[in-house]
Image (cartoon, grey):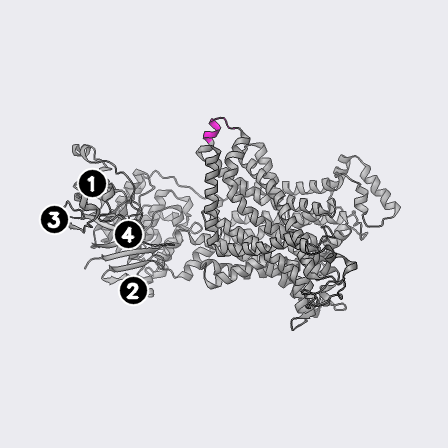
Amino acid sequence: MSLLQDVAVGEPDPIREPRLSGSTVKIVTGKVVRAIVTLAFVVLFNFVLFRMLPGDPIGMYTRGRNMDAEQIAALRAELNRPLWEQFIGYIRNPFDPGIDSVRFSRPVWEMIGERIWPTLLLLGTAIVLASIIGIWIGIRSGWKPGSRFDKFSTGTTLTLYSMPEFWLGMMLLIVFSVGAFGIPGMFPVGGISTPGVDTGSPAGWLDVMWHMVLPCTTLTLIYLADYSLVMRASLIDERKQEYLALARAKGLRDVMVRKRHAVPNALLPTITLIFLSLGFVVTGAITVETVFSWPGLGLLTYEALRGPDIPLLQAIFLLFSIAVIGANLIAELLYVVIDPRVRS
Amino acid sequence: MSLLEFRDVSVTYRGADADVPAVRGVSLSLDAGRTLGVAGESGCGKSTLASTVLRLLPESTKVTGEVLLNGEDILTMKWGKLRAVRWSEAAIVFQGALHSLNPVQSIGKQIAEPISLHKTSKNPNKRVGELLEQVGIPASRADAYPHQLSGGQRQRVMIAMALACAPSLIIADEPTTALDVMVQAQVLDLLSGLVRDLDMGMMLISHDLGILGTSCDDLAVMYAGRIVETGPAVEVFDRPEHPYTQALAGAFPRIGDPQARYRPIGLPGDPPYPGDIPTGCSFHPRCPAALTECSSVSVELRDAGPGRRAACIRVGS
Amino acid sequence: MSSVATQRRRLAAGHFWRRFRKDRAGMAGLVILAVFILTAIFGPLLISPDALDVTKADGDRFDSPSPSYPLGTDEAGRSILLMLALGTRISLTVGLAATFVAMVIGTSVGIMAGHFRGLSSHALVGVTDWFLVIPFLPLAIVLATVLGPSTLNLIIVIGVTSWASTARLIRAQTLSIEGRPYIERSKALGAGNWHQMSRHVLPNVFPLVLANTTLTVAIVILSETTLSFLGLGDPLAPSWGALLDRAFSTGAVSQGAWWYVLPPGICVVLVVLAFTLVGRAMERIVDPRGAAT
């Protein structure tokens, strides 16, 4: 072998072996525990907010609604129990199917169950589309900052980012559904399907998708603004790294340097930030579903708000929090899996 | 024909407000099988000069003169030819800092990349193993990630990577900075050994005159974008002619050398900012032996003995 | 001693302004803001509150723009242009007030969390993290429902739900500042916690706080618009969000009354965009690492 081998033998440098078990398990467990603790505080918050605040609790529950004497009496009995008893009863099962919506007089979780699929359909499609388009825009503008494409796309995305999503939805409705400025209205004015159409059939599916075009476009535009700005910033940071100069010195074309080195590294924080922005996604969903009368959780929130239907609001808040906490947890775990630096 | 030749090379960066001349009229040459050291403080332009060899400077930079690699001018080469030349004819050993390597790719993959790109071997993975062994790292470590290696190991990975396509020229830019003294010695021995065995040419850049004095054949000292002294390395280090070199050499006293006690130690002031270079001899504000003419007369390199040149008005008189 | 510091700060401010003037996007944002601020100040002085009075309105219902009603009329025949001008003051006031609340909470929590060690720091960080995770709108809805619809409650709700990202930023900055030698020296000289935080950390954190505040106003105005749209603000105040809420509930959309919907939204976009541009320009000056581009 090389005569330099003996030079290496005397080397004092330590050799660090990669370890997948041990410390990784500890990291993961730590994050899961933190997520559960956060969730516990949500449950506590829910309870505290509605039962411990000053003022007439009965008034709050029945504000604007007519409840018969029997319901009011039952409610009063419930609220007159000692606080800690109420808390035990509450945490026993916050998902208790027995709790009824004040406004609709139906079990809260039954109502939520009905409305969850339309929301998942709408949000899921919008997130996927926004990710693909947003990341593409972010890469193109981040790789050559200051270029014409960059100036144009950054200006557009900043403007979209400054827009109330429900306003965009309303304008799209006026222009493309009712018809304005010379453009004929083609799209449905709201809802998820045309009455009378069987949503199970292929024709029904097409009908649903037709109804989804405008709300999905609205959400996609809003989300992609966020995603592309994040990707752009990430890539601009990555461009400054030294290993890219090395890649260029090796003779790689600019496109390859970008595709093979810069983008994969810049994508890491972007993907996790997309997961972390689920809170932002949820906010958009509530108002957009309202504008388009899309029968999902967002519209349900709006309807609960009109009451106000406290049990329903509490349950929805809990559900949204779980979703966001879960997404945050996934984002953190994703980093552990993808980034070799975090593993050891 | 020299392996590498700089002919009156000047590099000017386009700054926000004004142009900054980083390299001003440098001419140097290096033959195969020999090592050329380039010494100087930070900001003197030595790294910029090295970047011209593979044309790695940003688009907005102005480069004049000729940089001849195996007789062909890099600066006017077509883009496609340049990419083919990169790494296969000349390669750079960057400083082995953590950020110089892609953190999410294994070192084996990164070493194999230029091999696959330039198609210099039918079995890249095998070649990667050979290269790692050559620099004293077990071939089994090819799957390691950069953060799992020590500083010395990373530097050796950079060397292995530079050798990947068997280039005829290696440029080592501060290969030992940020390493412990013992590891420094190992890396330098490794480099010199490889240059000897593989009959390559090497341009070694450092601010550490001591290292260059002992491991290079020839030595050039740069100050404020210009060469101020050249000659055989040992001679330049033992008997520097230019006051700046004397000050640099004085910073590394030799134990057991009684003369060392009489040399000037240290240098007041800082090297000039490239955008604001003094008139006349750019060193005159800090020169302990400056004459009145030095502030107005600019001196070119002049003979200072056999094979020795220095840009000082006191030399050759 | 304080005059030297004041002089230096004035110099720094002048320097900051000179650099800001060079930033085209930032200046554009500033100009837009000036227009809106002037409208907010002088609008209610020049326009009589009768413009809001339903009984005094004499336009047709949902009338499209005409010379007498440049932005058309609403469902009760009132001039939308006048209501928009009046609403400017409300939207901006609520935005600035809520931002103030958020910044006071966020900066204090951030500095304290960065300064103190141990249990109190962990608790503050925990609370900050909780507010960062929980989705804004559901939380705001829940809080606003409990507190009731009024402008003051709106300011409180938005302030309470928007301080967390500021706190996190300020905490990181505090930690880096406190690592500097002069803090140690001041501690050795006997500086107490309050003195350190207010005299050393706060002035150094201030430029970052300023940039962050501007960006926060942008977010807060969007939040106010959303909450007003959902009916959680004062129903009588014609803030832009409330105008959009009325447009929606009275069927302006199905009537195709774009003049009712387009203008309030454009106002929101312009103001939010203006604050964003100014804030990003400030960030570019304040953050030498160039994190914002």
As drawn, A47 above or below C116:
below
- Label 4: how many residues lie within 10 Å, few (<14), some (14-19) or many (20+)? many
**What residue range appears in magenta?**
C184-191
Local SS, label 3: loop
Residue drawn at point x = 44 percent, y = 60 percent: A144
For the residues labelled 2 and 4, the Cα–Cα distance comes to 19 Å
Residue C65, quarter of the rendered image: bottom right
Residue carrying label 4: B171
Residue carrying label 2: B77
Residue carrying label 1: B246
Q: Earlier in the sequence, mark 1 or mark 4?
A: 4
Q: Earlier in the sequence, mark 2 or mark 4?
A: 2
Pinpoint the chain carrying mark 4.
B
Residue A284, quarter of the rendered image: bottom right
For the residues labelled 1 and 4, the Cα–Cα distance comes to 25 Å
Residue drawn at point x = 28 percent, y = 59 percent: B89
- Label 3: how many residues lie within 10 Å, few (<14), some (14-19) or many (20+)? few
Report the label total.
4
- Check disc 2 and give the amino acid type: Met
Residue carrying label 3: B306
Can residue C181 be seen from the camera position used here? yes
